[in-house]
Amino acid sequence: MKNKKKIAEQAVKDLDASGRFKKPIVTEVVPASTFYPAEDYHQDFYKKEKMHYEGYRRGSGRDQFIQNHWEG
């Protein structure tokens, strides 16, 4: 588990040092806690409720963020 933490911390440092973002990365690496899977009706929501999901994506700004910061 310590190795995974070191890998995650190094990834944050590397991304911060890359200059990809104007502000420093402030994501804290913490130990994993209990994981609770979502109910069945949430699984594959993007397939089950395609129109709703696509509207959410357009409105959230996520695609624009990815395009501006990761694909550029």
Image (spheres, rainbow, N blue to C red):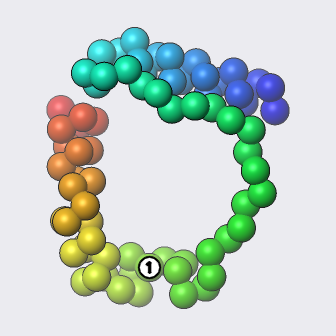
Of 42 and 33, nearer the camera is 33
Look at the picture and state if 64 lies above or below 11: below
Would you say 46 lies left or right of 69 here?
right
Q: Amino acid at mark 1?
A: Phe
Residue 48, given in percent of the width and then of the height, sits at 41, 87
Q: In the picture, residue 18 is in which quadrant? A: top left
Quadrant holding the N terminus? top right
Would you say 56 lies left or right of 25 here?
left
Q: Is residue 20 visible?
A: no
Identify the residue at horizontal 38%, vertical 76% (top origin): 46
Identify the residue at horizontal 73%, vertical 45% (top origin): 32
Residue 24, given in percent of the width and then of the height, sits at 37, 20
Identify the residue at horizontal 58%, vertical 18% (top origin): 10
Identify the residue at horizontal 18%, vertical 38% (top origin): 68
Q: Is residue 14 visible?
A: yes
Q: In the picture, residue 23 is in which quadrant? A: top left
Q: Residue furthest top?
A: 17
Q: In the picture, residue 56 is in which quadrant? A: bottom left
The mark tally for this picture is 1
Look at the picture and state if 7 lies above or below 63: above
Secondary structure beneath dot 1 equals helix
Look at the picture and state if 11 lies above or below 38: above
Of 34 and 11, nearer the camera is 34
Look at the picture and state if 3 lies above or below 47: above
Of 34 and 42, nearer the camera is 34
Residue labelled with disc 1: 45
Q: Residue furthest right?
A: 1
* Within-10-Å neighbours for mark 1: few <14, some 14–19, many 20+: few
Would you say 14 lies left or right of 33 here?
left
Quadrant holding the C terminus? top left
